[in-house]
Structures are given as C-alpha cells and as structure tokens.
Image (cartoon, rainbow, N blue to C red):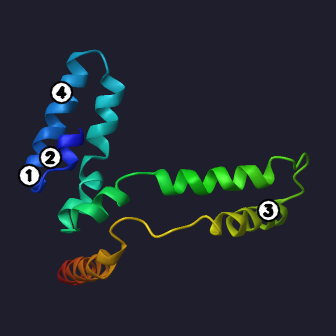
Amino acid sequence: MRDAYRSASVDVARRRLRALASWLERNGEATAAGSLREALEETLTVIKLGVSATLRRSLSTTNSVENLISSIRKVTRNVKRWRGADMARRWTALGIHHAERNFRRFRGFDALPALVAALKKLQSTVDAEQEAA
C-alpha cells in the first residue's frame, strides 16, 4: 500500500492497489478488500492533482485530525451531562481553541498554492462537463 501511494503515476498506484485488494480477498480479508476498492479512486486524488510528494505525504495521513480530536477529548472528558447541541458546540470550540496552541505548519505547506490552483482547475473542468450535459 505504501508503494502504491508513493507512486508517481496514478495508473501505477491504481494497479498496485487493485493487486493488493485481490491479495487481501484471496487471504480471507474480503471486508478490507471491499473497503479498499470502494474508496480507491478517492484515495488517489492527491496523486491526480499533482501535489508535491511532501505535501502528499502530509495530506495522506489522518495524524492532524487525530491530534485535534485528542485535544478536544482532553478538554471535554470531565463533562458528565451534555445539555444539548449548543453545549457540545461550545465545548468543542474550546477544545479547538486549546489545540490551536500546539498547531504547527505541516510538511509541504509551501505547496498549498499549487494545490489550490489544481483544485480550481479541476472544479472548472467539472463545471464545464456539467454544463455540457
């Protein structure tokens, strides 16, 4: 899987992931194979967009999200009785505010303008296809 996501080409990555899914299925992991096949194209998005390898690596993990969720849990762990959605939103906002102190730039942040340009280009292509249809 690691080799697939480090591939320079979407086609190579897709082939490797399909081979992995077949291997998983043959070895009794049909659920894992199904999950991989279901999200295969979405997981290749960062490769399709031509994002730099460093930024791709940062965007391909859930570490930053997990870190944020952990910070929110630390702040909210002493709440014993939740009194509605507004209370949950306030405590979540407080958790994010506390987590913000530990935020830092992630690797490849300098390539974000290129990512934004690639996303805008993709969106204009999708919009043109929808107008044509």
Amino acid type, mark 4: Ser
Q: CA distance from mark 3 to mark 2?
A: 41 Å
How many marks can you see? 4
Residue 104's x, y, as percent?
51, 68
Q: CA distance from mark 3 to mark 1?
A: 44 Å
Q: Which residue is mark 2?
A: 14
Q: Earlier in the sequence, mark 4 or mark 1?
A: 1
Task: Check disc 3 and report its element: helix, strand or loop.
Answer: helix
The residue at 31%/33% (across/down) is 34
Residue 2's x, y, as percent?
24, 41
Q: Quadrant of residue 101?
A: bottom right
Task: Check disc 4 and report its element: helix, strand or loop.
Answer: helix
Q: Which residue is mark 3?
A: 91
Amino acid type, mark 2: Arg
Few, some or many residues within 10 Å of mark 4 (<14, 14–19, 20+): some
On-image quarter of the N terminus? top left
Q: Which residue is mark 4?
A: 22
Left or right of 9, for residue 20: right
Task: Check disc 2 and report its element: helix, strand or loop.
Answer: helix
Q: CA distance from mark 2 to mark 4?
A: 12 Å
Q: Which residue is mark 1?
A: 11
Q: CA distance from mark 2 to mark 1?
A: 5 Å
The residue at 66%/63% (across/down) is 99
Residue 66's x, y, as percent?
55, 50
Amino acid type, mark 3: Trp
Amino acid type, mark 1: Asp
Q: Quadrant of residue 30?
A: top left
Residue 88's x, y, as percent?
79, 60
Few, some or many residues within 10 Å of mark 3 (<14, 14–19, 20+): some
Q: CA distance from mark 4 to mark 1?
A: 17 Å
